Each structure stands twice: as C-alpha cells, then as structure tokens.
Image: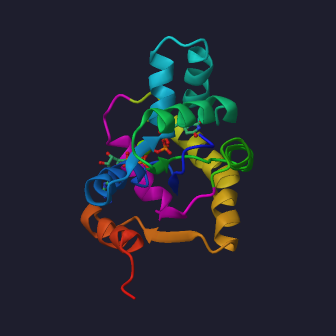
Amino acid sequence: LANKKVTVVFVLGGPGSGKGTQCTNIVQHFGYTHLSAGDLLRAEMKSGSENGDMIQNMIKEGKIVPSEVTIKLLERAMLDNGNDKFLIDGFPRNEENRAAFEAVTGIEPQFILFFDCSEEEMQKRLLSRNQGRDDDNIETIKKRFKVYMESSLPVIEYYNVKGKVRKIDATKPVEEVFEAVKTCFTPVAA
Ligand code: UP5
Ligand code: MG
C-alpha cells in the first residue's frame, strides 16, 4: 500500500447516524469507493475465517475488534481496488485504531466527515432497520452507544483539534443531510 498513493476520507458518527446511507450517495456523485469496516468484518465472519467467532462475539457485545484484524481487511480492500479515493466508514473507532492505521499504512486522512445525531434518533433508526443485524437489538445498541461515547468520540475530537472535521447535522432527513455532505466534497471556486 505504501507504493499506491491514495486519498482517504474517514466517515464517522454514532451507530445509526447514517454513515452507510450517505456513503452510497457520495459514491454516486464523487467517484469514491466505499469501504465500511463493519461490512468488511461481517463478511470476514461469514467467510469462515479463523477470526470469525471472535468477530461475531465482539459485534454482539458492541466491542471494538483488535485493530490488526480490521486494518488488514481495509488494506486488502484498498489494494484490490483500482480506485485511489476511498471513504472509510466506521473506522477508526478508538485511539488505538487511529494510531495503528497511521503507523501501518502511513495514510493521513484528507478530512473527517462527522455525522452528528441524537441518541434518540439513532436508536429509533436502528430498531426499525430490520436487516437482520445481530447488533440491532436494544441491549447491544446501548453497549454500542457507550463504546461510541467513551472510545470513538475522542478520536473525532483528536481530528477536530487538527481542523480536519466537517461536522454535519445528521438528524435531518436523508436528502437534507446529503445537501450538507455535498458542500464538503465540492471544491470552492477560486
Ligand atoms: N437512515 C439513515 N439516514 C437517515 C436519515 N437521515 N433519516 C432517517 N433515517 C435514516 O442508517 C441506519 C438506518 O437509518 C437505516 O435503516 C437507514 O435507512 C436509516 P445507516 O446508514 O445504516 O447508518 P450507519 O451509521 O451506517 O449505522 P451502522 O449501524 O452501520 O453503524 P455502526 O457504526 O454501529 O455499525 P458498523 O457496521 O460500523 O459497526 C458494527 C460493529 O462492528 C461495531 O459495533 C463493532 O463491534 C464492529 N466494528 C469494529 O470492531 N471495528 C470497526 O472498525 C468497525 C466496526
Ligand atoms: Mg453502517
């Protein structure tokens, strides 16, 4: 990966804040490739990998999978893809994820897209998603919120101090959120 020059945007925000939904829109309009860390982990789990049981347990408990596992999946996905622009959705989730990704890949994100959404709204969305995810039950949702507050928000704050965070009000309807997202990707005329 060191030989491939890539642009990365980290797409962060709480469980159910709309990361995946908006990434689909961004892909269509701005030519990025969407890599959801959660989707990669769920695929790895289903592929019968030796880490499958561990990943399943971590997701069920809302815990963060060890960074070497997630980073390997992200690296492989970026190498296998011909594109050089990636949206990394749902990663890094804690300080250790962040530091390890930077150390292993040498990649510094272009910016961080941060979907800010109330817990009440996120909970409502997750409980009505109905896609059969093992972690969309009220017990696991509470755990995901707690890990988000304790471990993931500090990563967003780390980048905020560096002036890299583009914060979006994600409580609004999908179309309105995307209008705000677009302004982050459209270059300002000179
Ligand atoms: N919806 C979306 N936008 C809406 C809007 N504006 N108004 C109304 N409804 C809206 O959206 C969720 C639902 O809301 C959908 O039904 C959608 O239609 C609707 P979605 O776009 O799926 O939200 P998203 O933020 O992607 O929610 P997701 O549940 O995927 O977020 P999580 O961060 O919880 O899940 P992720 O897959 O990233 O991670 C799952 C688990 O994997 C983690 O808890 C962890 O255990 C593990 N993990 C790691 O260990 N390491 C990683 O690096 C990544 C994951
Ligand atoms: Mg998602």
Q: Is residue 69 left or right of residue 43?
A: right
Q: Quadrant of the C terminus?
A: bottom left
User: What residue lies at 64% left-to-right and 70% top-to-bottom?
Assistant: 160
Measured as percent of width and height from the top left, residue 96 is found at: 74, 45
User: What residue lies at 39% left-to-right and 65% top-to-bottom?
Assistant: 171
* Front residue (pair 64, 113): 113
Q: Is residue 53 visible?
A: yes
Q: Is residue 3 left or right of residue 168?
A: right
Which span is picked out in magenta?
A: 108-132
Q: Where on the image, by quarter, is ligand 2?
A: top left
Q: Is residue 90 left or right of residue 152?
A: left
User: What residue lies at 60% left-to-right and 11% top-to-bottom?
Assistant: 50
Q: Quadrant of the N terminus?
A: top right
Q: Is residue 117 magenta?
A: yes
In the image, residue 70 above or below residue 154: above
* Front residue (pair 135, 156): 156
